[in-house]
Amino acid sequence: MAFLRIFLLIIKMLDDALFKFDEWENELNESENKFKKKLGIYAIDLMALLLFSYFFGALLYVFITFLPSFNSIIVSFVKTLGYIFTGEREFLSPSLFIIPSPYISFKDIFLWLVLIAFISAIIVYLNKDNNEFRMVKILAISNSILRLVVINLKIEKSLVIIGPIFIFVTLFITYAMVPDTFFVAHILEILFFWIAIFVILITYSSFNKDSIRAKRFVIFIVFIPIVISNILQNKTQGSISLLFLTVTIFLTFERVFAILVEYKEQIYEGKEWIFALRNLEQKDYDKIRTKHNLDNDDYLEIFEDKVLAGMVFYKGTKRDLLKSKVCFESSLVDNPDDTFCKYLLAQVLVDIGEEQNIQKIIDLLQEIKKQHQENPYVFEVIDVEERIAYLEFISENPKYNEIINILKDKRNLQNDFVYILGVSYLYVEDLKKARETLELLEGKEDKLSFNDWHEYMAYLETKEKELNQENN
């Protein structure tokens, strides 16, 4: 559970970074300075490269530092089994099956990061002629793969009990079937044979392809350093041994990258919703629409992923807000705690723009805010409180006190929210605060979405005069 929280925290941090990169890139796209725009995009890609190197280098480092603990568990387990079946306390020399693990210092961490950054830079260079290749997108894809693995990696806690029982029973039956001398001489090979069988059973215990893919990916990642380190320890200097080492390393990494390619294809088919929302283009949504025949009347029955179907209708070329609304509402019936789907439904209702939808949008955003307070790892809507304040302000019966409570302690508010806060103060007749707030917009009136700042300032002056007359 602790490991899961670590990965969820990494995913959340990368999500926040990617959102910030998107904001910066949007600001650059609005800039008229071509040099600044081009240089800024390179700078964003460089930051994405460094972030990619830092996070995934750190994950690799953490895994390698756990190898000694993993090794000690194996040594203790095999020694215990050896004693049970042979009665010898000093059964097998640990050096026969130790997993070599380097002692890593801060210098080594830095070198790991440099190495990963260098490899990533080589990949960027090899794709220099590909206009669609961006390091930011690679970071987004990597984060989406990590999210899919965490979501689909379902391993029962009961395996902690079932695993040792399975190994013990299979070893006992093997011990009863084969000669004692053979069992004693080959106990290590027999042990790892049955461990491999058990790992296969765990991997394919569910018929869910996504779960199987996630387990295979984790297994390959776990065994890569173990396999390579053992080969390096036991290799000879012969050409055949070196060739075997090269082929083994190639095949091991090739299998991992093959799974990564599968994940990438899944991501571009909309399997990971957050990536789809932020990175897929209209043409990508149109491909999904055509592939899954979403123009059929029974689209909700033939296509299981209702959230993706809703995004196709919302973001594709042929926009259909009503169908999108139906998809998201149908998905929330099956999964009422899905904050991402609630956010999308709120967006669709905003675009539909009917007065009766405003309160429903506010309720959806309030639910998202509450769920995020209870569980910080769920999908987070950036500036959710500001969105609630805005919708409350444009509703038929605004709750000005609630708007003030939301906005009054916020820093660096956009001009529109400063306006909303000032007008709210005016309506609750806190004239001093209203003047202090609305005067902040003097000279910025043309940048507001609202065009009645002057009218409210005139109304404020009238109210102040009335108050002065009453006091006099």
Image (cartoon, rainbow, N blue to C red):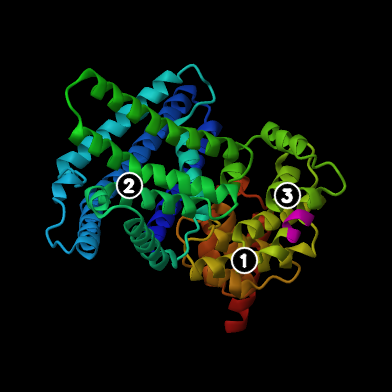
* Residue found 75% across the figure and 48% down from its top: 303
Most distant residue in the top direction: 129
Q: Residues within 10 Å of mark 2 (few under 14, many from 20)?
A: few
* Residue found 60% across the figure and 51% down from its top: 208
Q: Can see residue 423?
A: no
Q: Could you say which disc has been placed on residue 59 in the image?
A: 2
* Residue found 61% across the figure and 68% down from its top: 367
Q: Is residue 238 above or below residue 461?
A: above
Amino acid type assigned to the residue bearing label 2 in the image: Leu
- The answer to which of marks 2 and 3 sits earlier in the sequence is 2
Helix, strand or loop at mark 1: loop
Helix, strand or loop at mark 2: helix
Q: Residues within 10 Å of mark 3 (few under 14, many from 20)?
A: many
Most distant residue in the front direction: 179
Q: Could you say which disc has been placed on residue 133 in the image?
A: none
Q: Which of the 4 quarters of the picture holds residue 123?
A: top left
Q: Which residue is mark 1?
A: 337
* Residue found 19% across the figure and 43% down from its top: 100
Q: Could you say which disc has been placed on residue 310 in the image?
A: 3
x and y, in percent, of residue 410 in the image: 47, 63
In the image, is residue 328 part of the stretch drawn in magenta? yes
Q: Is residue 267 above or below residue 192?
A: above
The residue range painted magenta reads: 326-330
